[in-house]
Amino acid sequence: MTKQKETKALDTTTEEKIKEAARNVFTQKGYAATRTRDIAEEAGINLALLNYYFRSKEKLFQQIMVEKLQQLFGVIIPIVNNDALTLEKKMELLAENYINLLVKNPELPLFILSEIRTNPDSLKNKIHIQEFLENSSIIRQFSEKRPDVEPIHFIASLLGMTLFPFIAKPILFPNNTNFDALMEERKKLVAVWAKAMLEA
Amino acid sequence: MTKQKETKALDTTTEEKIKEAARNVFTQKGYAATRTRDIAEEAGINLALLNYYFRSKEKLFQQIMVEKLQQLFGVIIPIVNNDALTLEKKMELLAENYINLLVKNPELPLFILSEIRTNPDSLKNKIHIQEFLENSSIIRQFSEKRPDVEPIHFIASLLGMTLFPFIAKPILFPNNTNFDALMEERKKLVAVWAKAMLEA
DNA sequence: AAAATCTTTAATCAAATGATTAAAATTTTT
DNA sequence: AAAAATTTTAATCATTTGATTAAAGATTTT
């Protein structure tokens, strides 16, 4: 197996080709609407290889899902508990880092949320975001700053302003013109609006 | 057909039972993950009746989708072009009306966005939100108030703060405790934050 | 060089699925 | 009451799908 992981500079293994194809097709269509033949075609391989390397469509999907969950939530984790950061700075960094991530992977949040909706168990034992947030210092910082407002409201607004444009991109930005520039501009706007929320 | 639409106070027609079941199952699982047998079982009818009344799964789905699109976008339309309303009032009403709608139909935005992702054509010729917004007076109001900021940023933030908590409910509010009360509270918060955004 | 192992292929399969159909039951119309 | 129309049922079907398999090819190990 280690040999398979070694790759030439210009080549990838069949296994990695399949995973890359799975990332593309699963995030575009979702699990149920994706046929194994779609993935094989995208990877340029024979269908049987999918089962040879991953045992089943479901197991391949699970690997992609775990990877995507880590990608999405990995942004939060190093920031919200960093005691060296002010609340304002945390909010600014969350917005900036998420926008950076999603400009490259705009389908990520909708993919995860859709699959959780279709299969609520797919989040179980993988990510405990609420418990994690409850125990993070950012929640304490929100409470100290605004004891009159439930901290989850700030979290929902900050993430809403940051993730929602990507989730609703087909509706809000159907022509895709200038999208990247708008998202770049949005980093500063969300940082300003985050501070304004705290003072309002 | 008119006779079928007439219903007794306590009964609904088979056709309406099927549609109600379709609403439930499609919005929970999405089109591809829903089997016609699921809908028949939820409606308590024989599978053949689905084809008898709707000709196909796809046609049934299209009816539900159009209905849901109207439901989601119907909130915007009477508000954004109402010249009697100030910009602040429009934003407040949008937030309030959307929260009222989504407390009753929390799965609505994610359902629509997911189906658009899986089948990008499903929005074509149905809703032209961007063009509609471009020609609405709210855009002009945003430009007058803040000529330095693209109006779509305000729209994205307002809708993000309003819709996103419902879209991300399984992650942000997994225990569902107090959710309705939080959303009720959120109406006022979003109104305040909307004004703060305009001034920031 | 030969054997062992890994990878790939083409063919095939069982199960599931959306749709169809003939017949029966029910309701409506005459 | 009889005929016609509508609705419902159980059975069935063609197609699709995820998975399996034997065999062949390629690579690695001895």
Image (cartoon, coloured by chain):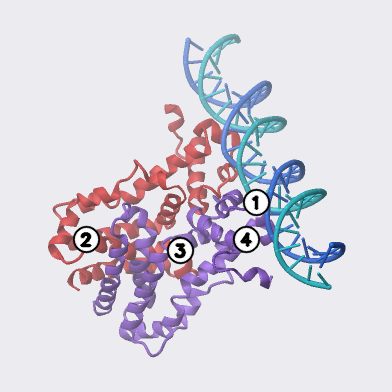
Chain colours: A red, B purple, C cyan, D blue
Q: Name the spot of residue B5 as percent of width and height, x first.
A: 63, 70
- Disc number for residue B179: none
Whether marks 2 and 1 lie on the same chain = no
Report the amino acid beneath label 2.
Pro
Task: Give me the residue at 67% from left, 73% from top.
Answer: B2
Report the amino acid beneath label 4.
Thr
Q: Would residue A79 be found to the left or right of residue B47 on screen?
A: left
Q: Earlier in the sequence, mark 3 or mark 4?
A: 4
Specify the subunit that label 3 lies on: B
Callout 3: few (<14), some (14-19), or many (20+) C-alpha neighbours within 10 Å? Answer: many
- Observer-side mark, 3 or 4, equals 4
Q: Would residue B156 be found to the left or right of residue C16 on screen?
A: left
Alpha-carbon span between mark 1 and mark 3: 26 Å
- Disc number for residue B108: 3
- Front-most of residues B42 and B157: B42
Specify the subunit that label 4 lies on: B
Q: Would residue A79 be found to the left or right of residue A168 on screen?
A: left
Specify the subunit that label 2 lies on: A
- Is residue A180 at all visible to an observer of this figure? no
Q: Which residue, given by chain and number where applicable, does mark 2 sit on?
A: A151
Alpha-carbon span between mark 3 and mark 4: 24 Å
Dots 4, 1 in contact, CB < 8 A: no
Callout 1: few (<14), some (14-19), or many (20+) C-alpha neighbours within 10 Å? Answer: some
- Observer-side mark, 2 or 1, equals 1
Q: Name the spot of residue B81 as percent of width and height, x first.
A: 43, 85
Q: Earlier in the sequence, mark 4 or mark 1?
A: 4
Quarter residue B122 falls in:
bottom right
- Front-most of residues B5 and B199: B5
